[in-house]
Amino acid sequence: MEQVPLSHVLILSSILFFLGIYGFFSRRNMITMLMSVELILNSININFVAFNKYLYPHQLEGVFFTLFIITIAAAEVSLAIAIVINLYRRFNTIDIEDTNTMKF
Amino acid sequence: MNYDISSILILVLPLLSFIGLALFGKRLSPCISGIIGTTVLFITAFLAIYTAYEYFFAVGSQAGTYIPHTAIKFTWLQFNENLSIDLGIVLDPISVMMLIVITVVSAMVHLYSIMYMRGEDRFRTYYAYLALFTFSMLGLVVSVNLFQMYMFWELVGVSSFLLIGFYFTKDSAIAAAKKAFIVTRFADLGFLIGILMLSYGAKTLDFATLIERLTQPGSAHLASMTACSFLGLSTLSWALLLVFMGGAGKSAMFPLHIWLPDAMEGPTPVSALIHAATMVVAGVYLVARLFPIFAISAPDVLTIIAYIGAFTAFFAAVIACTQTDIKRVLAYSTISQIAFMMFALGVSGWGEGRNEGFTASMFHLFTHAFFKALLFLGAGAIIHAVHSNEMKDMGGLRKSMPITHITFLLACLAIAGIPPFAGFFSKEAILSSAFHGNPLVFYVALVTSGLTAFYMFRLYFKIFWSKAAESHGHEQEHSHNHEKGMWAMNIPLMILAVGAVFAGLIPFGSFVSADGKAIELPFHLAFSIAPVAVGLLGILIAASLYKTKNDRPEQVIEAFGRAYRWAYHKYYIDEIYLFVTKRVLFNLVGRPAAWFDRNLVDGMINGYAYITTTTSEAIKPIQSGRLQTYSLFFLGGVLLIAVLLFVKFL
């Protein structure tokens, strides 16, 4: 069976990455921004797995890294959700435009 | 008990008393804290007498010579291997003599103040200050090191400042305290420069080593300090002259005397202790401490001291004749008497038969402490009874205050130099040494001792005899005894009166002399005729003018005219000082300095602040609080790095 070439996978991860960036900058809802960050992380994960598979098929470092990133992403999300809930309690909104009191 | 330990205790007890009263005084009742302070001082006085006894009669002398004995000494600050500041206690004839004077007078003043200061708000603070002063003065006289002396010198200055300004709600007291502090501080600047010059030349601050290095002929240090001269005086002479400037400030020598009369704003017992008996003689003590250097290596400075002393003695005596505030009369009298001690040192020389001036000076210091403290305490009792400092409010008090009257009379006789009271012997010794040392000074001193007798008895007759015409109506009021129940005020008066009468009978020359060997103070009956006659003449004139109310004083004042007015206004010295400081120094130095400070120094600082503010105002909108804007900057940075890497590795 013919393999999917590496470039296809990289294109997929790039699309995911820039979708995430776009989401992060264009959305005003904090939950959506969080989801965009997850997209960025996952695109990186795909990169790691793909390079591991195509360049060094006998080693597992890329896969391990992916596992680490998934763990950290889970921790980060739980923290971020906690912050979002606190912000909601304080400002009664999760719109990023309205929570700009931390300035000069 | 070892007398080393007792000499250490003499210093430690007043310090403990000060710390205790200052920290815990608020929890004690005023009476208890006064009693504690007084008890401590009485113990200290007994220790001092014990120490003196041990030193003079048991262990101090070797083969007829009193040698300095170092009770304790440790290095406090080491500059280099040669120069260090030591703290310690040295016992030699003059320091032991001063220990007695200070502790006895201080104990009397402590006891006296229990009643004099009763009912004051800050009674406990007053006792704490008194203890602080006593400690610092004791530390000053037992110094082993020139710098230790300077430290205690400043401490007595501070405690004097605190006590002059004790009634700090009174404007005049505040002004007097500031004046005393600034004038003596200004003089101490000279003292400090003198110390630095001496220590630079002799490479030591220790008294014994300093004196040894600067008096031995042929020593390298002495040669280096006398090698070059400026305005006709060698470096050593300048250094000693600057040291004397410090002494002149503390001892109120002309022209630095202006603070002492104003210092009378303090409570009267304080004037008795600090501004009559102890602190103001610190300058004399300083010169006496360094006397071998003065006498052997810089006799020219001693001559200057003699002339300054003689002039001050006469000048202050003239002013004292015209003042109407009894404490001010006593203050000028103090200046005059200290000047006697000063010029006695000045006319003295070094060596057999020429150094009796030193002994005479110390003798007069000793006797003066008793009778002047007595005069001040007596004046305090009078002020306490009359509630006024002015002579015109007094008169005819001899019936209502018999004890004060008798003791005051004894002190007046003592200061006037009438035999056989204490002042007679010491003043004889001074006059005799002046006669042999410097005839000009002798004649000035002779006239001054006549003036002394005159102004003291003017004071005495005006207070106790002459009755103002209008006060006849108050006879009933005056006739009751003001002294009843005032035992704490009367006992010190009586004890000091004993000193004022009998202190002159001590064979002082066999205890205190410049080189430690006993000398015989000259005493010729023929010589003492003139001073005693002058003194009696002064008393007679005072009696004829002031014993009963008459108009002769006014006629005398008329006859003197302008001379009287000048003396009454203290020769306008205060005004001259004010002119020099306020008009000249303030306009020529103060204002330009203030302009420089406001415009250049402050301007630079304000300029920095202005630049910082405007810059931060300009850039602060970058911190907008919008998360996504921050991330955009971040993204821009990342992209920039990516582009750079791309360009580099392409």
Image (tube, grey):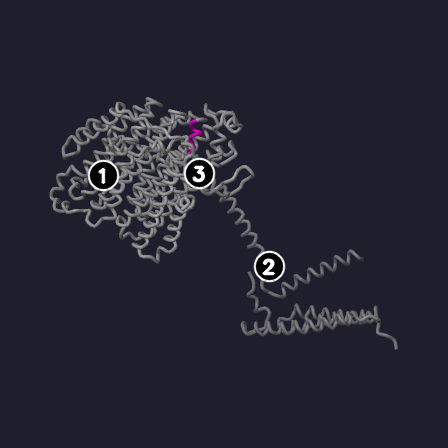
Which residue extends farthest bottom?
A1
Q: Identify the residue under disc 1.
A: B408
Decide: is A21 above or below B252. below
Q: Which amino acid type corresponds to the residue marked 3 in the rendered image?
A: His
Q: Chain of mark 3?
A: B
Q: Identify the residue under disc 3.
A: B69
Which of discs 1 and 2 lies nearer the camera? The answer is: 1
Helix, strand or loop for disc 2: helix
Classify residue B353 by image quadrant.
top left
Q: Is residue B442 left or right of residue B400?
A: right
User: How far separated are the C-alphas under marks 1 and 3?
Assistant: 38 Å
Q: Position of residue B312 (x, y in %)?
A: 33, 30
User: How far separated are the C-alphas under marks 3 and 2?
Assistant: 77 Å
Query: Residue drawn 30% across and 43% down?
Result: B265
Q: Main secondary structure of the magenta part?
A: helix
Q: Position of residue B619 (x, y in %)?
A: 58, 55
Q: Are marks 3 and 2 on the same chain?
A: yes
User: How far separated are the C-alphas under marks 1 and 2?
Assistant: 85 Å
Question: Label for residue B622?
Answer: 2
